[in-house]
Amino acid sequence: MARLDERVSMPDSSTVHAVGPVANAVRRSIEEAFETSYDIECQRQAEMTVALFEACAHAQETGWDGYSGEGVRIGAYVTAEAFLRVLPRYLPAPEISVHPDGQVAFDWTADRGHVFAISVGDDDLISYAGLFGGSKVTGREVFSGTFPAGILPHILRIAALM
Amino acid sequence: MLVEQHFSLSKNLVKYRAFLPELYQGVFSTSMFDVDGLDHESIWELGRINVAMPRRKTLYGHAELRTLDLVSQGLAVKRSEPPERHCDVVDWPIEKENRMSVAQELARAARLVLRP
């Protein structure tokens, strides 16, 4: 029978002090959940980083696309990697590619009429364009190392359909 | 289309990236072919000889658009031969975000045709 003082809350505070078999079991479950969540996020981050690396490795030199596509610039790679690091974990992972101008692109595609795309280069500007059925959006945001809040609603609109 | 990432088989669509222009001689331009009046076999042959073979790449398919789809986005189609039937799609916006937006509209209108 659990006692009243076998309280369990967030693992960084009172859980540590909880006693008894029930509290211990719940604490283990919570810790495992946190570890699993952390592992999943780490795995997702690793997969996105690999996808970025592969896309850039494929587009290193001018003409990589069979035409006159510019090779991806190191600055664009660095900015893109920084962007992925601050991408909220609740958003779907984007498709990563390189544009013919050497910029790195992040795309979310639900269907042909619902798509949102971000393009990052070797400066601190992010260009974006989205198609949402009958409406569309374009714009620019400054990327200073934190996720640009202005683009979040656009990604969420597409994510809801994916 | 020479790049697998330019289309989605599962979603049966052409991705906007397939239409993004390249900066060629100071002008943003997308390379296309006028296939009016050609049967499927002739279109494949046109792509194989003029697009895939010179680049030693695999031809996965092509995207079909009407001229109206291009013009309605403010683009212009200019004949640019040789090769025969080759066209440059020009008059793209200067701003990157607007080029992406136009390409997204083209992708919405395009029909994906994959190699049999």
Image (cartoon, coloured by chain):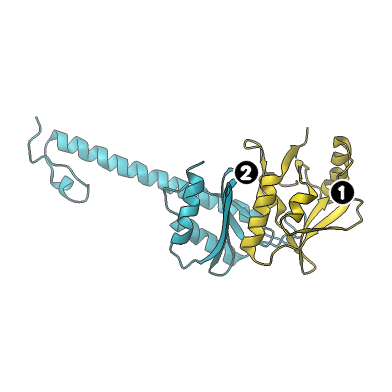
Q: Mark 1 — on which chain does it sit? A: B
Direction from residue A134 to residue B116 in the image, left or right: right
Distance (Cα) linking label 2 and label 1: 28 Å
What residue is shown at x 17% (from left), y 45% (from top)? A15
What residue does disc 1 label?
B50
Quarter containing the N terminus of chain A? top left
- The number of numbered badges drawn on the structure is 2
Q: Position of residue B21 (x, y in %)?
A: 73, 59
What residue is shown at x 58% (from left), y 54% (from top)? A136
Q: Is residue A118 visible?
A: no
Give the amino acid at mark 1.
Asn
Q: Are marks 2 and 1 in contact (CB under 8 Å)?
A: no
Give the amino acid at mark 2.
Arg
Indicate which label's residue lies in the foreground, 2 or 1.
2
Instruction: Return the residue found at the far top.
Output: A1
Q: Position of residue A46 (x, y in %)?
A: 48, 49
Image height of B40 relative to B23, above or below: above
What residue does disc 2 label?
A112
Image height of A82 relative to B56, above or below: below
Q: Mark 2 — on which chain does it sit? A: A
The residue carrying pointer 2 sits among few (fewer than 14), some (14 to 19) or many (20 or more) residues within 10 Å by Cα, namely many
Q: Is residue A16 visible?
A: yes
Front position in the image: A33 or B10: B10
Q: Position of residue B89 (x, y in %)?
A: 79, 57
Direction from residue A61 to residue A140 in the image, left or right: left
Which hue belongs to chain B? yellow
Image height of A61 relative to B85, above or below: below
Front position in the image: B112 or A82: B112
Which hue belongs to chain A? cyan
- The numbered mark at residue A123 is none
Helix, strand, or loop for circle 2? loop
